[in-house]
Amino acid sequence: MIENKDLTCVKLRTDKYSARIYLNRPEVHNALNDILINELYDIFAELKKEKDLRVVILTSEGKSFCAGADLNWMKSVVNNSYEQNMLESLKLADLMNIIYTFPTPVIARVNGSAIGGGVGLMSVCDIIIADKKATFGLSEVSLGLVPSVISPYVINRIGETYAREVFVTGQRMSATEAAERGLINMAVETEDLDKFVDEKIKYIMKNGPEAVRIVKEMIQKVRLIEPGETREYTATLIADLRGSKEAQEGMTAFLEKRRPSWVKDMNSES
């Protein structure tokens, strides 16, 4: 496991079943640079190996979740070669993909505003709970750029109609509007952020660990496979699962009106 002493832009806190990742550049509103991107990617790559991990919380230090690209980093990018720009863009794409396809749920605890790449970073998470005071924006066009790498994930959340509007205008939106448009799951009072995050964690922890992993895979697959293939895929999936050890335990526990073993095992750890 990566240790905090090896990290400069990110902090990591773990226990047996959960991990909390903090963007840790509060002095620049947790703006993205190459170091932060690489450290985040490495952390998710390492966490992917943890068999007991049940949930990841992605949040940040300071008043902002993520202000997009760091200005000093952008100054250096201006002088990059095409090859350098391509490599850095691919690394950001890899980061977005590893979070989006992460086997266990990832909750974004958005403790402040998110702009540009910050919107992308939260959009690849499964659940987004944001501060009601936060604002969100995709202002790349004001810099002569576009939200290219993050666009598939943002469009997945808000749909093409609204994406066309916010991508071409760069207009900011409030947390209330972001919730109405589906960009975030909920906007809550600042003091209630942890309460709502912890509530989602508790729900996740009650569920079969393998079922949660498989349902995440299923969501991605049913969106991509041809309509005619969904019948075979979904029927095979549930038939296989019904005979699995976890499902047998879950259904038996329900019929016997007791907690399934994965919940009992967790309680014995505490």
Image (spheres, rainbow, N blue to C red):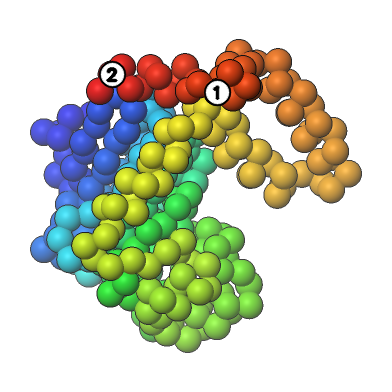
Residue 257, numbered label: 1
Q: What residue type is disc 1 on?
A: Lys
Is label 1 in a helix, a strand or a loop? Answer: loop
Q: Is residue 91 above or below residue 111?
A: above
Do tag 2 and tag 1 residues touch (Cβ < 8 Å)? no
**Residue denoted by label 2:** 269
Q: Quadrant of the C terminus?
A: top left
Q: Quadrant of the N terminus?
A: top left
Q: Is residue 56 above or below residue 25?
A: above
Q: Position of residue 48 (x, y in %)?
A: 41, 29
Q: In percent of the image, x 48 and y 49: which residue is there?
A: 126
Q: In which quadrant of the rendered view does residue 251 lie? A: top right
Q: In percent of the image, x 73 and y 28: which residue is there?
A: 237
Give the left or right position of residue 16, taking residue 234 as reference. left
Q: Position of residue 197 (x, y in %)?
A: 34, 50
Is label 2 in a helix, a strand or a loop? Answer: helix
- Depth order, front residue of 156/191: 191
Tell me how far mark 2 sits from mark 1, CA to CA: 22 Å
Q: Position of residue 183 (x, y in %)?
A: 48, 67
Give the left or right position of residue 126, taking residue 265 as reference. right
Q: In percent of the image, x 71 and y 21: which residue is there?
A: 242
Q: Can residue 66 be seen in the rendering of this structure?
A: no
Q: What residue type is disc 2 on?
A: Glu
Q: In percent of the image, x 60 and y 13: which residue is there?
A: 245
Q: Can residue 2 be seen in the rendering of this structure?
A: yes
